[in-house]
Image (spheres, grey):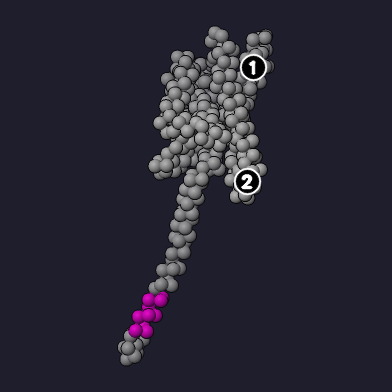
């Protein structure tokens, strides 16, 4: 489901963004980079589909195992960082519309995108240096499973640091930005009651709620699970049952984390007016093509009858008799 909806939804989003490239701004730029991140993950996800379908048995080799792990975590933290960039961009646009115009220029936004990609790459690059696959006594080979990392020194400190930098700091920034935006929108509504009737502020508020809900559903369970288990490991050695429970929780939370690949296009649809209009236009065009193809035989038949009747009416009287005899 993630592969199909994620790939199709993000390719459609990329098509719309590319079509409106002349109207490129900082918001569109961050959205495009988020789409690229989702498409990259969707492309490599079939290898994970095969892995799970074979009952957690990886047969594609160690190099590809490392590459899929790299793309998974690049997608996760690129998604987190670009959603944070979008929230900061919206914060400056709504709360300080005239003070930080330089930061929202396209040239500056391009530099920020490059910096984000570099930070994410250096965050996840150590994965390429670690052995990701492990041969099990059952004869199967696991790939990118938590027990494969247990031998890494100072693992709890590394994962807690990654969760703090990669999730908790962006979450605090997003909550602050969107709370300030909501306050500003409420103040605007009080000063100008007409804005409430137009529904602009309500739409912006709904978009804020949608972004936060997607962020919390996709990224929070995984990082909370990692955090609480690493804190346990620093205090005492978890027993076998706790390890098994943690492994099961990781399978569920990683699935939720990958779900952001499908939900990001939903954010574009609700937040970006141009994207929404383009999608609706494509759907209407497809519906009109389907309906016209369904009614074409009847239309052709009626037009044929009409042509024939017009031809008969235009024939002189004596030719009409011959025509009817001939028929």
Mark pair 1, 2: CA separation:
50 Å
The question of residue 291 being in magenta is answered with: no
Image: magenta residue range? 305-314
Q: State the image coordinates of residue 83 (x, y, percent, origin top left).
A: 53, 31
Q: State the image coordinates of residue 179 (x, y, percent, origin top left).
A: 63, 32
Nearer to the camera, 273 or 41: 273
What residue did someone put label 2 on? 192
Nearer to the camera, 303 or 58: 303
Relative to 62, say whether 38 is above or below: below
Q: State the image coordinates of residue 93 (x, y, percent, origin top left).
A: 53, 36
Q: How many marks?
A: 2
Quadrant assignment for the C terminus: bottom left
Q: Is residue 164 visible?
A: yes
Q: State the image coordinates of residue 150 (x, y, percent, origin top left).
A: 56, 12
What residue did someone put label 1 on? 229
Q: Identify the element where label 2 is drawn.
A: loop
Residue contact between numbered discs 1 and 2, judged by CB atoms under 8 Å: no
- Residue drawn at x 33%, y 85% is 315
Q: Identify the element where label 1 is drawn.
A: helix
- Residue drawn at x 32%, y 91% is 318
The mark found on residue 190 in the picture is none
Quadrant assignment for the N terminus: top right
- Residue drawn at x 54%, y 15% is 148
């Amino acid at each position: 489901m993630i592969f199909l909806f994620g790939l199709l939804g993000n390719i459609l989003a990329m098509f719309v963004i590319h079509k409106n490239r002349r109207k490129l701004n900082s918001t569109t730029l961050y959205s495009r980079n988020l789409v690229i991140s989702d498409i990259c993950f969707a492309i490599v996800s079939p290898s994970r589909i095969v892995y799970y379908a074979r009952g957690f048995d990886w047969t594609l080799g160690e190099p590809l195992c490392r590459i899929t792990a790299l793309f998974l975590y690049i997608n996760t933290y690129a998604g987190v960082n670009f959603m944070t960039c979008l929230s900061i961009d919206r914060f400056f646009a709504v709360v300080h519309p005239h003070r930080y115009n330089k930061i929202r220029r396209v040239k500056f936004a391009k530099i920020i995108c490059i910096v984000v990609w570099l930070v994410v790459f250096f965050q996840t690059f150590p994965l390429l240096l670690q052995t990701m696959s492990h041969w099990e006594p059952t004869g199967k080979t696991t790939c990118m499973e938590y027990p494969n990392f247990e031998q890494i020194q100072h693992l709890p400190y590394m994962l807690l640091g990654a969760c703090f930098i990669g999730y908790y700091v962006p979450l605090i920034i997003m909550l602050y930005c969107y709370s300030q935006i909501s306050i500003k929108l409420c103040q605007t509504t009080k000063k100008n009651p007409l804005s409430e009737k137009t529904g602009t502020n309500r739409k912006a508020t709904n978009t804020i709620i949608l972004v936060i809900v997607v962020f919390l559903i996709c990224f929070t369970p995984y990082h909370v699970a990692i955090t609480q288990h690493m804190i346990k490991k620093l205090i005492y050695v978890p027993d076998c049952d706790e390890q098994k429970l943690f492994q099961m929780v990781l399978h569920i939370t990683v699935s939720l984390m990958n779900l952001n690949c499908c939900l990001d296009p939903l954010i574009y649809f609700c937040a970006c007016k141009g994207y929404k209009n383009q999608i609706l236009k494509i759907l209407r065009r497809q519906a009109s093509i389907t309906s016209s193809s369904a009614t074409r035989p009847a239309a052709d038949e009626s037009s044929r009858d009409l042509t024939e009747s017009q031809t008969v009416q235009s024939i002189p009287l004596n030719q009409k008799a011959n025509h009817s005899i001939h028929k």
